[in-house]
Amino acid sequence: MGAKRPAKNRHLWLRRIGLAVLLIMAGLLLSIVAFRFVSPPITPVMVAERLSGRPLNYRWVPLEAMARDLPLAVIASEDGRFCVHWGVDWGAVKDAVKEARKRGRGFRGASTITMQTAKNLYLWTDRSYVRKVLEVPLAYLLTALWPKERVIETYLNIAQWGPGIFGAEAASQQYFHKSAAELTRREALLLAVSLPAPNLRNPGKPSPRMLRMAKAVERRMPILAARSSCVVPQVNRQSASGQRGG
């Protein structure tokens, strides 16, 4: 009798754990479907900022209410194959792994815009292999359930652009005292190159290195415009190869 009871208890716990996992997965799937149509009220990264004592500056605006150059500048800076991959750029992953082996330390980079959206929406910011592994299935789910326009729109609205600053609208108001719709190309580029290190790079007071990075991204924009038709309409591609704003 005594031996059967522990076995019964184990089965009960396994069933409970399995049920909990199923509920979590169902909740995750439902939230991804819901966030295709409604803006997320808060993210884990925002919660962490709030718990650290910083006030949140978070404003959601539709993609149409952002300067035409902003999504293209971010794609050119962060993920040049955004429109053609399925959420994960395995070529970039292989290159990052090779580079890590050459340098003898953990690999960095290779996160697509979709992976970063998944991270910002559901995970944490500390670098770890566990987080990287979790980003991959989440990125595939986002790609399967959302159009590319929704991915870039969500990314630009929940990305961190400084201590407590989330979203392109809040960043535009903070650094340039104007709406995201009024950004010049130069300002859009400075916002784009600050994304990898939002707490260290100030788009309103760019360092010489940031200015060089922005120039490099600007040179890529006409080429990337032709590959970014999934989110950048024809008028944007004409803009990218025409006059340079700023």
Image (tube, rainbow, N blue to C red):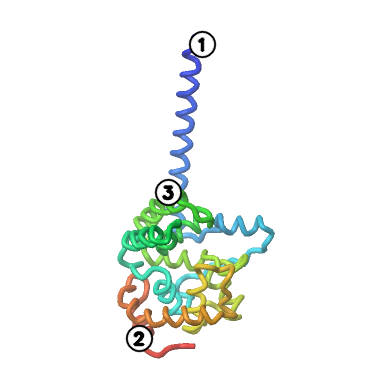
Pick out the residue farthest to the bottom.
Answer: 243
Find residue 209 and report its horizontal and vertical position in percent.
Answer: 51, 79
Q: Which mark is residue 244?
A: none
Which numbered disc, 3 or 2, marks the residue that appears first in the sequence? 3
Q: Amino acid at mark 2?
A: Ser
Q: Which mark is residue 241?
A: 2
The CA distance from mark 2 to mark 1 is 78 Å
Q: CB of mark 1 within 8 Å of CB of mark 3? A: no
User: Which residue is disc 1 drawn over?
Assistant: 2
Splitting the image into 4 quarters, where does residue 37 fall? bottom left
Would you call the spot at circle 1 few (<14 residues within 10 Å), some (14-19), or many (20 or more)? few
- Residue 88 is left or right of residue 58, and the answer is left
Mark in front: 3 vs 2: 2
Pick out the residue farthest to the right.
Answer: 53
Q: Amino acid at mark 1?
A: Gly
Going 52% across and 77% down the picture, which residue do you hit?
180
Find residue 175 and report its horizontal and vertical position in percent.
Answer: 60, 78
Going 59% across and 80% down the picture, which residue do you hit?
205
Judged from the image, the secondary structure of the residue bearing numbered disc 2 is helix
The answer to which of 17 and 153 lies nearer the viewer is: 17
Which numbered disc, 2 or 1, marks the residue that appears first in the sequence? 1
The answer to which of 93 and 12 lies nearer the viewer is: 93
Would you call the spot at circle 3 few (<14 residues within 10 Å), some (14-19), or many (20 or more)? some
Which numbered disc, 1 or 3, marks the residue that appears first in the sequence? 1
Find residue 17 and report its horizontal and vertical position in percent.
Answer: 48, 33
Judged from the image, the secondary structure of the residue bearing numbered disc 1 is loop
Find residue 123 and report its horizontal and vertical position in percent.
Answer: 50, 53
Mark in front: 1 vs 3: 1
Splitting the image into 4 quarters, where does residue 173 fall? bottom right
Splitting the image into 4 quarters, where does residue 229 fall? bottom left
User: Which residue is disc 3 drawn over?
Assistant: 29
The answer to which of 96 and 91 lies nearer the viewer is: 96
